[in-house]
Image (cartoon, rainbow, N blue to C red):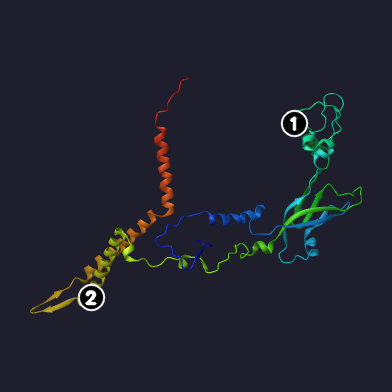
Amino acid sequence: MEGNIVANTTTFNNKLVTPNLGTVIRIAETYGSEAGAGGYTTYYTGSLTLTASVQDYDMKQWALREGITGSGIEIKKIFFEAPPAIVRYFDPYAGTGTGIQSLLETFGFGQFSPGINFLLMPIYFDVQKLQAIELNDQIRKSAFSFDLVNNNLRIFPIPGDRADGAERKLFFHYIKRDERNDVTSATPTYDTGSSTLVTNVSNVPYANPVFCEINSIGKQWIRQYALATVKEMLGYVRKKYSTIPIPGAEVTLNGDDLLTDARAEKTALLEQLRAMLDITSRKTQLENQSLEADYIQKTLMNAPIGIYIF
């Protein structure tokens, strides 16, 4: 119920409260923040200027230069990847009759291949060549990779100067730890207006039921509990005046017996009410539905299966 918004004038009496996935989704959204798939924690984009021949970079110093204080940042994703294999595609069979005329002009890949013949090869032929280029880079070259340990970011291979003299930028996503650790930031904001927030059982909008609207089973339970309460009060009275003088003798009243019986009846009635409410709970209903489905499946397993001959 936590987090549900209900109007002040609204009560749950005589209404069917249908469970939903609202609370489950709100809990799941906090996990989505860690996976970068929604949630309440903001993802920021940062960039780091790479210096030629410098392999290690202190991300804590970068955060200080950006004016980020507090508990610091946490890097979530670093965009440091090798150039796609398609830009380095070379067809060694161009002009021999076994190559291709580009990589399917329909996809806009043709300008990257020097193929000059008109033999169209299957698409997997091109995919295998791209995979061969990438595998070659991983085994024979220093593959594009990085290590992020504590505050130190080490990238591979060691950066070099660009041919055009422009700066090399390394982009990444990060979050601020202060924002993630703030328990109030993970609570969605609502336009409550004249509504109230249900936070615990004390402010659930249930009003006192009207006796005339209670069904026969509830009325019978109320009568029995009222009778046990009256019996208990009468037992206290008779226990206080345990004996009554009469002409020539005294009469002993049964106050103790009434108290014992009344307390036992009230305890039994309360246990009966708890058991009745537990039977009608959502958890018990789901368990009963699961058992019913299992029994139905077992019954159907014993049913003969028809054999069809064509």
**SS label for mark 1:** helix
Q: Nearer the viewer, residue 55 or 221?
A: 221
Mark 2 highlights which residue?
A: 237
Q: CA distance from mark 2 to mark 1?
A: 97 Å
- Asked if residue 264 can be seen in this view, the reply is no
61 horizontally vs 196: left or right: right
Residue 148 in picture, x, y percent from top left: 75, 53
Question: Which tag, 2 or 1, sits closer to the chain's start?
Answer: 1
The relative height of residue 205 versus residue 35 in the rendered view (above or below) is below
Image depth: mark 2 or mark 1 in front: 1
- Asked if residue 46 can be seen in this view, the reply is yes
- What amino acid is found at the position of numbered circle 1 in the picture? Ile
Residue 17 in picture, x, y percent from top left: 44, 57
Residue 177 in picture, x, y percent from top left: 69, 62
291 horizontally vs 225: left or right: right
Picture residue at 44% right of the left edge, 49% below the top: 286
Residue lying at the far left in this picture: please name it.
Answer: 248
285 horizontally vs 27: left or right: left
Q: Quadrant of residue 238?
A: bottom left
Residue lying at the far top in this picture: please name it.
Answer: 310
The relative height of residue 145 versus residue 310 in the rendered view (above or below) is below
- What amino acid is found at the position of numbered circle 2 in the picture? Val
Residue 274: give its label.
none
Mark 1 highlights which residue?
A: 123
Q: Residues within 10 Å of mark 1 (few under 14, many from 20)?
A: few
Picture residue at 54% right of the left edge, 56% below the top: 22
Residue 84 in picture, x, y percent from top left: 80, 41
Q: Quadrant of residue 268?
A: bottom left
**SS label for mark 2:** helix
